[in-house]
Image (tube, helix red, strand yellow):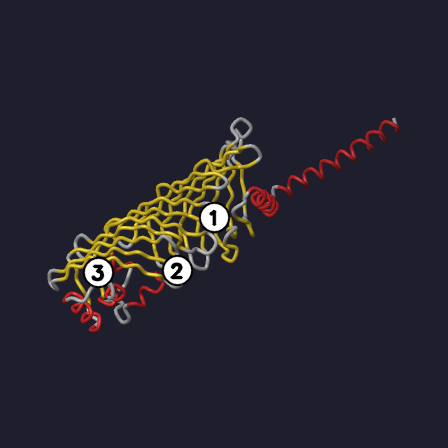
Amino acid sequence: MVKTGFAYRKFIIPLFALLCLAATGIYVVTRPWCVARIVKSAVNAQGEGFQLRDLSFKKLTIDPAGSLAIKDVRFSFVLAQQKDQEWHGQIPAVYLDNLRSLAKSPKIIVSVARADVATREVRLKNVSSKVTLLLTGAKWNISGASMQADSLAAPGIALSSLEAYFSGNDSLLIADPCRARWARGNLKGRLTVTPRDYTIHADIAQVELGEVAPGMRGRIDGNADIEIQSVDNAVTAMNGRFDAPQGAQIPAAFLQPVVSYIPASTQRDILEKLIAAGTDVFFDHANVRVKSARSDSLNLLIKMDSKKLNLDLAVTVDLNVEGGLKSLLDRLPQLAPGQEGA
């Protein structure tokens, strides 16, 4: 009897210890800080285009249907080509679905609600999205995604009512279509991102010119195709067409680079006087076609007519732009000093 009790104690004590260790282990691995660390390591092992630098959340729950809810998520990450720009964000709630069926259907559906994400220069507010992750081999890939946001603000542009639909693989991300409200008009386009560069096709309708370039008036329609290097955001190519079918009013100083391409004529004299006087020019119709084959060259075909000034311009302009096309766009507001808000 004594031997039996001793043997029982030899069995039950280690078993109890193992149960305690198992309970402790389960408690630890289900704590938010531990799960966040595991998720961060897994994401960084899978992601080639970005690195998750920080991840934390306060609470996680699993319902009987097998959906995981993660509350009050905070994170930061950097993109591989822009490591000097750190993105920060916070999400009230993230939901992971299809966990119970993971063995039969190797996919996870991630839903995000009311997220805010920002860098020093870019800010996305009130973002909601749904992403479907599909396990292919040993890697998770995005098979489809959608996003809606109240606003996106970046240098030189502010969008509202933004929505986009994504697809792609390890080396390609496509957002098609993208839609947004911009400068009291509408913007629709397609964004393609690769490790080397990204391309943008955009169609604009009834965009208020004064919202884009202070000192101008009128509404414009048009489209553009732009290629941009991922490393330094250099514009390597641009093709575009922009029309102001109801007319446009611009500071005459904006035409300064064009004057030297106009042969000596009454029209050139009129323009030079308007530029010297610092006045505005109203055109009944304006059409501009832009072509940039390299980041430091720009070809413009400009057609404008003004019945009031008896002007009918049709001129081709070739510019070599020091610092590239992006530098020219950055300097545009300086071409018409004192005209802002005109």
The residue depicted at 25 percent of the width and 49 percent of the height is 205
Q: CA separation, marks 1 and 2?
A: 18 Å
Give how far across and how far down residue 207 sits, in percent. 25, 53
- Tell me whether the residue at label 1 lies in contact with that at label 2, contact meaning CB atoms closer than 8 angstroms: no
Q: CA separation, marks 1 and 3?
A: 37 Å
The amino acid sitting under disc 1 is: Arg
Q: Earlier in the sequence, mark 3 or mark 2?
A: 3
Give how far across and how far down residue 244 sits, in percent. 20, 54
Q: Which picture quadrant has residue 311? A: bottom left
Q: Earlier in the sequence, mark 1 or mark 2?
A: 1
Look at the numbered disc 3 and give the secondary structure of its residue: strand
Q: Which mark is residue 196?
A: 1
Say few, some or many: other residues with alpha carbon within 10 Å of mark 1 (under 14 / 14 to 19 / 20 or more).
few
Say few, some or many: other residues with alpha carbon within 10 Å of mark 3 (under 14 / 14 to 19 / 20 or more).
many
- Tell me whether the residue at label 1 lies in contact with that at label 3, contact meaning CB atoms closer than 8 angstroms: no
The residue depicted at 52 percent of the width and 38 percent of the height is 68
Give how far across and how far down residue 108 sits, in percent. 50, 35
Q: 199 above or below 308?
A: above
Q: Earlier in the sequence, mark 1 or mark 3?
A: 1
Residues 196 and 166: in front is 196
Look at the numbered disc 2 and give the secondary structure of its residue: loop
The residue depicted at 62 percent of the width and 45 percent of the height is 34
Q: Tell me how many marks there are.
A: 3
Look at the numbered disc 1 and give the secondary structure of its residue: loop
Q: Which mark is residue 324?
A: 2
Residues 56 and 273: in front is 273
Q: CA separation, marks 3 and 2?
A: 27 Å
Quadrant in the picture for the C terminus: bottom left
For disc 3, the marked residue is 217
Q: Which mark is residue 114?
A: none
